[in-house]
Image (tube, rainbow, N blue to C red):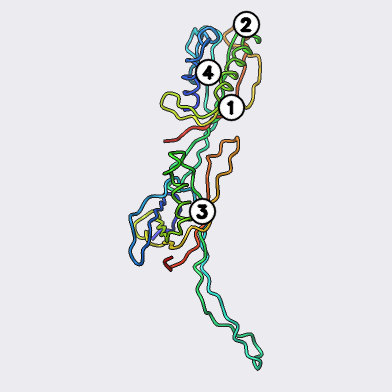
Amino acid sequence: MPNQVGAGSSASYCTITGTTTGTTATISGLISIGANSRQTTFADVTALSDTTMQRIPVRNDPGTVQLTIFLDDTTTASNLFTTLNTRRTSKVHTRVTVNLPGNNTDDLLIYDGYIQEISTPEVAANDDALRFTITMQLSDKDN
Amino acid sequence: MSAIGLALRTYLSGRAGYSATIPGGISPEVAGVGSSMPYAVYQLTSATPQMQLSGTPAVRTERVQVTVVSTTRASAAVVGDWIRAQIIASPGRQTIGSTLVHHWRVEDVSHLAEVVGDGDDEPLRVTVLDVHGTYQES
């Protein structure tokens, strides 16, 4: 398989209810998806008699992921900015699926979690298209 | 081909005073032989897309050079000022023809004389406007 490039990717989102996923919708105007770092936390189990620090892995932290999106200047009540912000305030368990270019890597990136933060666009008198960023706190657990 | 240049030509041709101010009209790259003066031509200098992850651009920013040609510097400058004033009059989001222009502005104006290489000593005066504009790519 060839090495991968990001251009040509797409992403969609849907609601997760238990193990059931709802209707998917495309995240239009997507600019970039930030790197997600998954970590394992460790517990310190060093005994007094130990001469070396002893740590064991205990919990897996799925981390967060950021998506940057062009603002779609359509009807305010139904545009993507409002839709995603409503998912934040309503605490909707959401799945974002990233489809990388090509056929063999479609399911590589699936993010389940909650929208933790959404930024309004920075508005300035320049040529930059307005964009906003959402941060998802990843979590498998339904609200 | 410049989308902003074409939109600018369409926009200016609909403005009051266009025919009287620029009797030679506005043409892409070069004007027709025997065009009345003053006339103007536009040329794409650069085009910068703002890309989506999908690989398609969302909007594109173009830099277009508009060159006004006349027999006197004053005449060329008047046309340059007129074009600049028209852009300032409507700088924001607007649909021109089939192009959605988000924003445009004149970044720079310069004047110079040019001697036509046709064996004639008659100099032409040129006013050059550097126009920046951003439009919807699709």
Label 2: which residue? B122
Task: For mark 1, give the secondary structure.
Answer: strand
Q: Measure how far apart labels 3 and 2 are at the Cα level.
A: 63 Å
Indicate the quadrant where residue B127 lies.
Answer: top right
* Label number found at residue B41: 4
Task: For mark 4, give the secondary structure.
Answer: strand
Q: Measure how far apart labels 3 and 4 are at the Cα level.
A: 45 Å
Q: How packed is label 3: few (under 14 Cα within 10 Å), some, or many (20 or more)?
A: many
Q: Measure how far apart labels 2 and 4 are at the Cα level.
A: 20 Å
* In the rendered image, the vertical position of residue B85 relative to residue A133, given as above or below: above
**Residue B56 placement (x, y as % from top left):** 43, 42
* In the rendered image, the vertical position of residue A17 relative to residue B21, given as above or below: below
Mark 1 or mark 4, which has the lower sequence index? 4
**Residue A62 placement (x, y as % from top left):** 49, 68
Q: Measure how far apart labels 3 and 1 are at the Cα level.
A: 32 Å
Observer-nearest residue: A1 or B74? B74
